[in-house]
Image: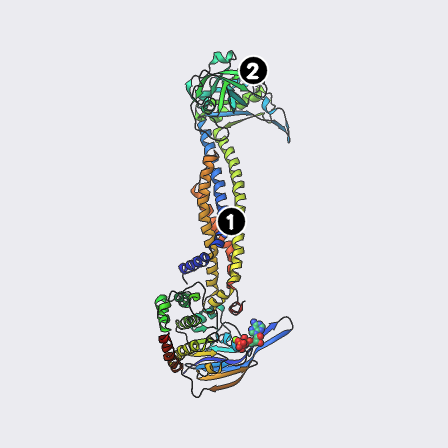
Amino acid sequence: MSTVIETCQLVKKYKLGAATEVSALRGIDLQVEEGEFVAIMGPSGSGKSTLMNIIGCLDVPTSGTYRLSGSEVSRMSSNQLADLRAGKIGFIFQSFNLLPRTTALENVELPLNYQGVPNARKRAEEALEWVGLSDRLHHRPNELSIGQQQRVAIARALVTHPSLILADEPTGNLDTRASQEIMSLLQTVHRQGGTLVLITHEMEIGQHAQRVVRLRDGLLVFDESVADPLDARKLVAAATPQEQTHVAVA
Amino acid sequence: MSLWRSVQMAWRALSHNKGRAFLTMLGVIIGVSAVIMMLSIGAGTQLSVTSRIEGLGTNLLMVSPSRIREGNIATGNASGSLTIADADALREVAGVAMSVPITSRGCQLIAGSLNTNSQVIGTTVDYPATLNVSVEQGIFFNQNEIDRWDKVIVLGPTVAETLFPDGSALGKTVQVVSNQTKGFFRVIGILASKGGSGFNNQDDQAIIPITTAQKLIFGSKTLSGIDLQVTSSDQMDQVTTLATDTLRRRHNIATGKTSDFTILNQEEMLGTLSSVIGTFTTLLAGIAGISLLVGGIGIMNIMLVSVSERTREIGLRKAIGARSSTITTQFLVEAIMLSVVGGALGIVLGYVGSTLIGWLGGLTTLVDTNSVLLGFIFSLAVGVFFGYYPARRAASLNPIDALRYE
Ligand SMILES: Nc1ncnc2c1ncn2[C@@H]1O[C@H](COP(=O)(O)OP(=O)(O)OP(=O)(O)O)[C@@H](O)[C@H]1O
Ligand SMILES: [Mg+2]
């Protein structure tokens, strides 16, 4: 198995004005192997998003090195980084994931268009079908529920078959049931061999991963595998009959 | 990312806020249509002047008085330098077929309750042949009438139509009022139309014997010019030289001094007028071009607003793999679309506008392909020029900052 993420003494400082500096990351060493499902947890302000943005090639560290699938990222040009984001990385954010006024299908097509891949439309349709939204292809984001919007975001993250999927609190705005559906999708991706890094501050969501990493004040303070991950499929299945009876009664 | 996709995206972004897009385009629409209208007036004037000068007749030389200049100071009387005796002398020059003295004034013509302000020309019997005009009804005056200072008048078709709408002009009396005096004239002929329009219309004039004009109406012996018809076109240069010598001798102009008259042939007249009209047109189109520039600034302004409104969208696009160049293209295509659609609408409006000017304003207008092309290329250039800065600004946004933008 090959290493997907390898960071060494990653430091990120933000300048606030002339004199003050905030150290968001203070020396992170993290390795993620291909096929792993890692949850990054930690209190608010501990540097989780900062770390994820660097891993996702959206930002560059102040010092330290980051190798993505063996190649050093800090030496790449902005075009190379853009191509990495288009082809190798799939992003899911907490909110504002989709372009407004643009249909689900077009949103999912977008990274393929940026890569210049042929038959983008067909692949986008397949990805949307995979997340269970084949009947919502031509809906715009404001015509979809938040949970459906997140599923479109997942379809878009997966459509390029990326080697790394990054999700920054994808369930942050969702209720329990919608969260379970999202987690179930992510676990399926993982079972099919995908490498995932997920940020969450919810204990239960973290327990769906294989491995939990904990940050505090920009340092990695805890790194352990999860003994018995929760299976979101079972939780969804357990919830479904109830709702069906509920619908039947109504 | 294909260009076609960018065009589709730009179209969607713009049609989302149609009102704003239209207002933004308005600057370009007005600018381009103004340029087209100004150029069409220029081209139309050029055309009508050219055809009028060509219509004057072939092998024509025009002698006109000019001020004598010593250094930069004009001395001598401009209109005093040519006389009927000069015209008679020029008739003797080898190669001159006809020599026609001309004196003209703007006068009021009155018939009953109707009146018009037209150019009244005093001249001799050779005028119709030299200047290529023909009499449609009645006759032109003859030498006897000139010798007797008869008060007879030949009307241009426009004048006849204005004063006698029922077409009964021939044989009627017309009162001619100059700034000196007035007199009653009998209408003996009506000229055929030359189809002119606008100022200095050849249909809008009246012709009387030169003697009558000088002695009874204008109260002055000076000429506005002498028109020469040359026997054949290859003698034009030679006749010009001989005529110049003759007149200089008659006017006692010492060698080395400037003549108090000028002799122009048709080509020179065309050249002079064309360059004046050209300068005029350039000036007008330049002023119109400034409004196009202002329209471009409007586009830049709206594109900058649009970039900051869509900062998060730009961040998201970059996060999922858009290169900076893709973002640049996207915003540039939007700006170009605004200006090109505006330019196309402006061309249509300019075309309609110049047709209306032609109808209502009585001016000849001509929209030629070059001015349409110019308007289009200009609006395209405006889009590229004023869209580039906002597009670069969008592309240079850091994806993280853009995503976090509130
Ligand atoms: N652009 C920035 N400028 C200045 N400081 C920043 C910036 N981004 C993040 N920080 C600081 O870096 C630290 C880490 O922020 P980060 O967003 O990574 O936290 P987080 O762990 O994701 O928190 P949360 O769970 O609330 O999302 C915080 O103290 C924050 O104030
Ligand atoms: Mg965060």
- The residue sitting at 48% across, 41% down in the picture is B37
Pointer 1 chain: B
Q: Position of residue B258 (x, y in %)?
A: 59, 27
**What amino acid type is highlighted by mark number 1?**
Gly
The image's mark for residue A162 is none
Please name whichever residue, A47 or A99, is drawn nearer the observer in this view of the structure: A99
Disc 2 vs disc 1: which is toward the camera? 1
Please name whichever residue, A43 or A159, is drawn nearer the observer in this view of the structure: A43
Q: Position of residue B256 (x, y in %)?
A: 60, 27
Q: CA distance from mark 2 to mark 1?
A: 58 Å
Number of callouts: 2
- The residue sitting at 60% across, 76% down in the picture is A22
**Label 1, on which residue?**
B27
| Number of other residues with Cα within 10 Å of mark 2, as a class: few under 14, some 14 to 19, many 20 or more | some
Q: Quadrant of residue A119?
A: bottom left
Which residue reaches farthest bottom? A227
Image quarter where the C terminus of chain B lies is: bottom right
Residue B121 in view: no
Image quarter where the N terminus of chain B lies is: bottom left
Is residue A77 positioned above or below B219 on the image?
below
Q: Does mark 1 have its CB less than 8 Å from ligand 1? A: no
**What amino acid type is highlighted by mark number 2?**
Leu
| Number of other residues with Cα within 10 Å of mark 1, as a class: few under 14, some 14 to 19, many 20 or more | many
Element carrying mark 2 = helix
**Label 2, on which residue?**
B216
Q: Position of residue B183 (x, y in %)?
A: 54, 16
Pointer 2 chain: B
Q: Of callouts 2 and 1, which one flags the residue occurring earlier in the amino acid sequence?
A: 1
Element carrying mark 1 = helix
